[in-house]
Image (spheres, grey):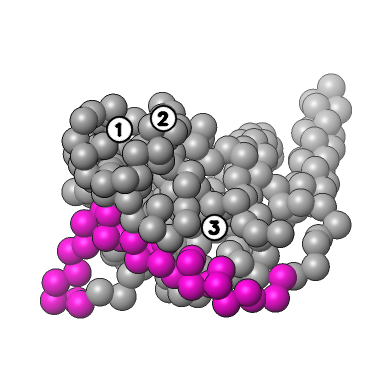
Amino acid sequence: MTPDIRIVLIQTSHPGNIGSAARAMKTMGLSQLYLVNPLDFPHPKALEMASGADDIVNQAIVVNDLAHAIGDCTFVAGTSARARTIPWPMQSPRELAESIYKTPQKVALLFGREQSGLSNEELQRCHVHTQIPANPDYSSLNLASAVQVLAYELRVASLAQLPITPAWDYPPATVEAMENFYQHLESVMVATTFLNPKVPRQLMTRLRRLFNRAQPDSMEINILRGILASVANALRSAEK
């Protein structure tokens, strides 16, 4: 069993970068390209820069928001070039590739806008962040180069034939299931007054980090949502 890997480009501004990213993917055996709100696509420049990877460009799946690009995935990694206020689990590209091949699942690798990268909200949807260890005095990598580096590490990991972890009894929870859980959790915490929506601080961000790090399976999420439902039912009974 091998991982199901997709490359997700968010709001790419230059169509040539889409083509160059597709070329980088194809040279390393990747074929699934998702585009979230590209600013100028389809475009002849994308096919020109693809240089033989036209099939990947033509088959790219265009969606309106990130949720539609990663909703059915069970593991999401985001590229980040700078430190964040609340630190997130971080892996080097090599560590990330090796971990993906040790436990194959449906994976999305997120790449942000050429000028500003991924937003904080987008990064909070990731299980881990990855950062290419470039020259600190000149760390500016273009989009296709960043895709090439991660695609290369994935190729190396696939050729290494790393041992596969035995199948878990239940599959990992999808991103969509996790988002539904977070909404449920937040509503219950507000109802119990544990969370003040007027002064939320960073509570939900830290809880997202906690559960993304734990990476619960589908049964565990069902159990957690059952607990939340029982709390909500108890609150309604108390009000009556």
Image quarter of residue 113: top left
- The amino acid type of the residue labelled 2 equals Val
Magenta segment: 135-164
- Residue found at x 19% / y 76%: 136
* Residue 121 position in % (x across, y down): 41, 45
Q: Is residue 29 located in the magenta-colored stretch of the structure?
A: no
Q: Are marks 2 and 1 in contact (CB under 8 Å)?
A: yes
- Residue found at x 25% / y 37%: 46
Q: How crowded is mark 2: few (under 14 residues within 10 Å), some or many (20 or more)?
A: some
> Is residue 47 shown left or right of residue 79?
left
- Residue found at x 84% / y 22%: 240
Residue at the spot of label 2: 62
Q: Which of 190 and 117 is in front in this view?
A: 117
| Res 38 label | 1
Q: How far apart are marks 2 and 3 (CA)?
A: 23 Å
The image shows residue 4, relative to residue 12, as above or below, that is below
Q: Nearer the viewer, residue 96 or 126?
A: 96
**Which is nearer the N-term, disc 2 or disc 3?**
2
Residue at the spot of label 3: 127
- The amino acid type of the residue labelled 1 equals Pro
